[in-house]
Image: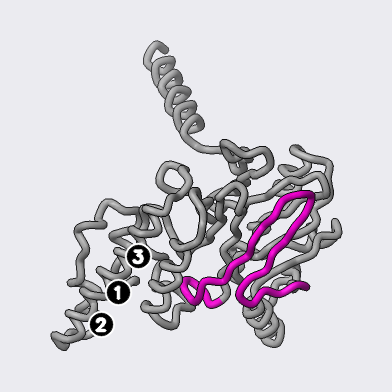
Amino acid sequence: MKALSCIAALAVLVTGSALAQTPPQTSTKKVEGTDNVYIFRYGGHQSMFVVTPKGVIATDPISYLRPAKPYIDAIKAVTDKPIKYVIYSHHHYDHIAGGQPFKDLGATFIAHRRTKERLLELKKQNSLLADVVMPEQLVDNQKIITLGGTTLELDYVGRNHSDNSLVMRLPKEKIIFVVDFAPIESVQFRNIPDNASPLEYIGSLKKLASLDWERMIPGHPSAGGRLGTKKDVEDDIAYMEDLSAEVKKAADAGKCIDTAMKEVKLPKYEKWANYEAGLPANV
């Protein structure tokens, strides 16, 4: 009996410890030093929303294969103002699928012009998800949104993780929201999807670094959940340049892709997230 009691007590301790270490599915926090900028986390995805006296500017619905209600509820818990805008960072489903409930509340959807082109192509193929909202306002290189005294600048800095990624910049707060193409202390995602040229990718990161900002909200929480800095973007540029140089050496030596994927190493970045799994695909 005493042994069974010990086992039961151990089970409670282990279960309690596991629960304590498992973060809740969603969370909302105000960005320190701001009055109206919030980060909504849904699992491993993040969005930014900005509350103004005239309404809310929300970004990425992040409701792919899950309900949008928690995001909407998170906004309603902060303000009773209507959601005026929803802005897509780029066309990938894990960030923008699930917007229909926002549309039902009267929100206007904004995205880069090529985002709409991508979604229309999916529609032609009968593979567009039913809850994906087609953007109504389009961005080419830049668009300024002003609502309730808040200005949000949407900038296109070139092809990178996608060919339609937007940088969302709050000039007054010196904050940007950037999704997927400027990871914090992490190698790039898999084989860098939709990327036409590593050189263009590097160019887009340099344009990002040249903008006037101090803190970066990422589309995925990383590096302990901290916000990014210009040093992080400079590190991404260095990683891409170092990777390109090493792959060029392998190509010049006549090595095939499979061999290069196995042999190219960048020890300088081995402590970054996804290094082991992501580097070969990056190569």
Give the distance between the C-alpha atoms of the residues marked 1 and 3, in whole angstroms: 15 Å
Q: Is residue 33 rendered magenta in the image? A: no
Quadrant of the snapshot with the C terminus: bottom left
Q: Label 3 vs label 2: CA separation? A: 23 Å
Residue 278 pos. (x, y %) = 34, 64
Name the one closer to the observer, 235 or 280: 235
Mark 1 against mark 3, which lies toward the viewer? 3
| Residue lying at 54% horizontally and 56% vertically, measured from the top left | 219
122 relative position to 255: left or right: right
On the image, which quarter does residue 241 sit in? bottom left
Locate the N terminus and report the quarter of the image it occupies.
top left
Note whether residue 128 is visible: yes
- Dot 2 or dot 1: first in sequence order is 2
What are the residue bounds of the magenta stretch? 136-163
Q: Dot 2: within a 10 Å radius of its alpha carbon, few (fewer than 14), some, or many (20 or more) residues?
A: some
The residue tagged 1 is 283
Q: Position of residue 243 (x, y in %)?
A: 27, 70
146 drawn magenta: yes
Which mark's residue is nearer the viewer, 2 or 1?
1
Type of residue at label 3? Ile
Q: Residue at x 33, y 58 (%)?
A: 235
Q: Residue at x 63, y 57 (%)?
A: 62
Is the residue 238 above or below the residue 78 in the image? below
For the residues bearing labels 2 and 1, Cβ distance under 8 angstroms: yes
Q: Quadrant of residue 66?
A: bottom right
Q: Percent from the top left, x then y, of residue 146?
A: 75, 57
The disc label shown at residue 237, or none: 3
Q: Residue furthest left?
A: 253
Please give the label number shown on residue 257. Answer: 2
Residue type highlighted by circle 1: Val
